[in-house]
Image: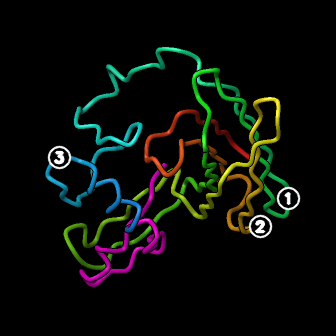
Amino acid sequence: MSFHVDYWDGLGWKDFLASSAYTARQRSYAASWPGGNVYTPAFVLNGREWKRLGLEGIPTPAAPTGVLQATLGEQGDVTVTFVPSAKRGGPFTASAALLGSGLKSEVKAGENSGRTLQHDFAVFALKSGEMVSQGGGEFRAKLRLPPGRVAKSQSAFAVWITEGRSLESIQAAGGPL
């Protein structure tokens, strides 16, 4: 997923996908990284910056983390359920994002001036909320994403679970709408 930050907007070109909330999110990540510098990493994996050029070596979970299910209604209502493995007891936070792909922007200024950039899996909407125990080891969250933000032919949906307010996801799922 691509969270477009707004700290580049001062270069004379405003990114239509950028959000100050995504900038704050990136600053939170950077504060937990060695050096604490805010910059655009290749990507973040489980709350850590991924410095390698390729995807080789991405770790797989050492043990099952649980079962995650999510539904997205036509009006943007999201229901997330999570049954963690016996080793995890919460509290948990659920996050859901609407994603857009096949998007283009004409850059008017800055280091990419004159270029047309292609954007895939750009975050259009993001909501997070605390999961509530339902008994029997199940946790549930109800979130609301704005309906109609992206044409279904260009959209995807992603959800992930963290423990408390951790930046490291413990389970994730997603797919096209």
For the magenta stretch, what is the residue range? 1-23
How far separated are the C-alphas under marks 2 and 3?
38 Å
Crowd band around label 3 with a 10 angstrom C-alpha radius: few (<14), some (14–19), many (20+): few
Crowd band around label 2 with a 10 angstrom C-alpha radius: few (<14), some (14–19), many (20+): some
Relative placement, left or right, of 29 versus 128 is: left
Q: Do the residues labelled 2 and 1 touch (CB within 8 Å)?
A: yes
Residue 32 magenta-drawn?
Answer: no
Relative to 73, residue 23 above or below: below
**Which residue lies most toward the top here?**
62
Find disc 2 in the rendering and name its residue: 147
Residue drawn where x is 22% and y is 75% of the image: 110
SS category of the residue bearing label 1: loop
Residue closer to the observer: 160 or 107: 160
Image mark count = 3
Residue closer to the observer: 106 or 49: 49
> Who comes first in sequence, dot 2 or dot 3?
3
Residue type at mark 2?
Answer: Pro
How far separated are the C-alphas under marks 3 and 1?
42 Å
From the top left corner, tell me how far across and down residue 23 is, in percent.
37, 68
> Who comes first in sequence, dot 3 or dot 1?
3
